[in-house]
Structure formats: C-alpha cells, structure tokens
Amino acid sequence: MFRVSAIIPGAGEGSRFGEKKQFKILNGEPLWAHTLKPFIISDFIDEIVFVVEDSLVSNIKKSDLFKQFVKKKEIKVAKGGIRRKDSVLNGIHASNNMSDIVCIHDVARPFIKKSLINKTIEACKNYDGAILAIPSVDTVKNVENEIINSTLNRSQSWMAQTPQTFHKEKLLEAFNKNNSNDDVTDESTLMELSGFSIKIINGDDKNFKITKKIDWELAKIIVKEYEL
C-alpha cells in the first residue's frame, strides 16, 4: 500500500471571512483541530503536514492540542507561502521523502469523513489522482465583465471539494510545468493541465468550505451531530 502524507494548508488570511477562521473556536476547539482529526484516525495516513504562516509555527507546536495530536500521529508544522499553492508546495517539500501520495485538504473543511479520505487514496491505485466533488445543482454560467458568455452543461458540471489526492512525483511535475499560471485555483487543475488522469469521487454536502459568516453559523449546527 502507499505511504501517504496529508497536506493541510492553513496559512490564509481569511479575507472573505473577515478573520483567520482556521483559529476561530468551534464547539470548544479551533477549526484546524476539527479538520485534522479525521486524518489522525485514518489508518491510510502516515503523517500530516499542517502549513501555517511563519509567525504561528511555534505557537501551534506549543499548543496543548498539538501535543495531544502528535501522540497519535506524526505531525509536522511547516511555514506557508504568499499564495495557497505556495503553501501546498511548501507542505509537499516538508513531507517525508518516502511518501508516494499526497492528500491535500482545505483547513476550512472540518467535516470531512475518514471513509472519503480513504477512497481518494485507494483510487490512486488506478489513476494519477482523485478528488472529491459533488454534482452541481445550479445552472453554471461562464461570465466576463458581467456578461454571460455561455451556459455550461449542468449534467457535466461538478463542484470540486477536497481532499485532492495525487501521486507525489506527478504533482510535483505538474507544479513545475504550471506553477506560474495564476488562474489555477486547485491542485487538480495543475494535474489536468499536465495531462494526468484524475478520478472524480462523490463527495458530501457537509464537506463544505467555510468561506462566509453564514457558513460558520451552519458549522455550529453541524458540529453538534457530526461523526467522524
């Protein structure tokens, strides 16, 4: 079986949310702690690389929660970069040299299930990578300068989630080829641009990304009944 490193980028400023949500307390614990737990209990994950801004690396390592977590799983804390993809790349470089697979997950998606993490890893037996996604329930418009260019076929449109899991060396190759492309918003796009085959796996509506204040209110409801 593969050796897998989970990369959790958490160095964002939270500009759309209005604060650094990854450190905001949800049901008694910071958001990042909720997000790490499913990866800690997954037998498929060998190590976790939590990527935060440089000034917070020491604080995370000294926290009581981190000290509890490292008793259960090997966890590294790496410093983030200017852009999200810089942080992801830093996390990959900080991962164990023996890792075959990297499993990248947004820190702002705290309700990921262990079973879905494992499915993306298992899919890498037959594909260059795999991501979670859910079918679009809305009609999707392609827009430029507030004018509609085209309407996408909803039956073929999926909303990408994380984790996004890939063969490590292939993802590094994709980074080398396409890292200067600022239009890239996720690692799957890098892989697609490089011609790799990426499997879609049905995700979960609860695996949403906390981006706006209303998402936080929903998270406060879900966390009370959530099971890993």
Image: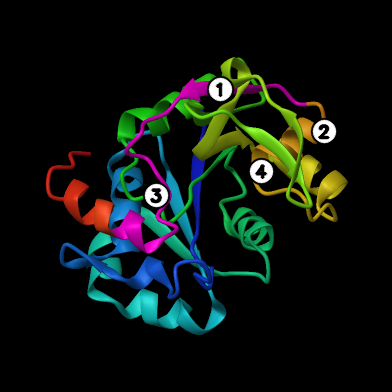
| Amino acid type indicated by mark 4 | Glu
Precedes in sequence: disc 3 or disc 1: 3
Q: Is residue 136 left or right of residue 167?
A: left
The C terminus sits in image quarter:
top left
Q: CA distance from mark 3 to mark 1?
A: 18 Å
Residue 154 in the image, given as x and y percentages of width and height = 59, 21
Task: Judge whether 91 appears above or below 196 on screen.
Answer: below
Q: Nearer the viewer, residue 159 or 22?
A: 159
Q: Is residue 28 left or right of residue 209?
A: left
Q: Which mark is residue 187?
A: 4
Residue to which mark 1 is pinned? 200
| Amino acid type indicated by mark 2 | Ser
Precedes in sequence: disc 3 or disc 4: 3
Residue 118 in the image, given as x and y percentages of width and height = 40, 29
Residue 147 in the image, given as x and y percentages of width and height = 76, 44
Please name which of the two marks, 2 or 3, marks the residue nearer to the observer: 3
Task: Judge whether 166 appears above or below 7 on screen.
Answer: above
> Toward which corner of the image does residue 42 lie, by quadrant?
top left
Q: How many residues crowd around disc 1 within 10 Å: few (fewer than 14), some, or many (20 or more)?
A: some
Q: Is residue 1 visible?
A: no
Q: Which residues, given as a range, are shown in magenta?
A: 196-216
| Amino acid type indicated by mark 1 | Ile
